[in-house]
Image (tube, helix red, strand yellow):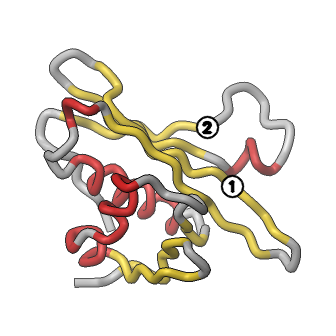
């Protein structure tokens, strides 16, 4: 699924760590940034941090921020959708952070995000089970 950026903004997908990666976490983690076109300012991001647990279970965990003046415009959902889409294409399981903020919980529970992805609450984390196909 190609997630469209909102008009007047653009996405940038970049490595989370710069320089030569020294371990698997640094190699596989990435960040999706939302940049405002009018002034080329980064106004929000979703970090996708790689983690690997015993039993060969690997996933990316989300962390995000969005400037307060940009909230309430649906941009958080757009950022999450792009980040989740990129992670799924890279073969990752996607999970929320262990204690998502109220804003993050609102995005995870939103009708717009759940229309795009099958999301379940598992052990107090939101987990993307699959992408929905229209």
Q: Give the image quarter of residue 58.
A: bottom right
Report the residue marked by disc 2. 16
Front residue of this view, candidates 69 and 3: 69
Q: How many residues crowd around disc 1 within 10 Å: few (fewer than 14), some, or many (20 or more)?
A: many
Q: Reading the chain from its start, which is encountered first: label 1 or label 2?
A: 2
Q: Mark 1 to mark 2: distance in Å?
A: 10 Å
Tell me how many marks there are: 2
Residue drawn at (63%, 50%), measured in percent from left and top? 49
In this picture, residue 64 sits left or right of residue 55: left
Q: Secondary structure at mark 1?
A: strand
Q: Residue at x 46, y 41 (%)?
A: 13
From the viewer's perspective, is residue 99 above or below residue 42? below
User: Residue 112, relative to residue 42: is it above or below?
Assistant: below
Counting from the top left corner in percent of width and height, residue 93 is at 59, 72
123 left or right of 127? right
Q: Which residue is mark 1?
A: 50
Residue nearer the viewer, 76 or 5: 76
Image mark for residue 92: none
Q: Position of residue 12 (x, y in %)?
A: 40, 37
Q: Residue at x 34, y 60 (%)?
A: 81
């Amino acid at each position: 699924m190609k997630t469209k950026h909102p008009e007047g903004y653009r996405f940038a997908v970049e490595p989370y760590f710069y320089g030569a990666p020294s371990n698997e976490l640094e190699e596989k983690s990435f960040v999706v940034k939302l940049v405002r076109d009018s002034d080329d300012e980064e106004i929000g991001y979703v970090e996708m941090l790689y983690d690997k647990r015993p039993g060969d279970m690997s996933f990316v965990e989300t962390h995000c921020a969005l400037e307060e003046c940009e909230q309430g415009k649906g941009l958080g959902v757009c950022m999450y959708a792009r980040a989740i889409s990129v992670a799924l294409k890279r073969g990752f399981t996607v999970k929320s952070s262990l204690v998502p903020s109220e804003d993050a919980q609102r995005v995870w529970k939103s009708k717009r995000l759940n229309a795009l992805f099958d999301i379940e609450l598992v052990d107090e984390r939101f987990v993307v089970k699959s992408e929905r196909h229209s």
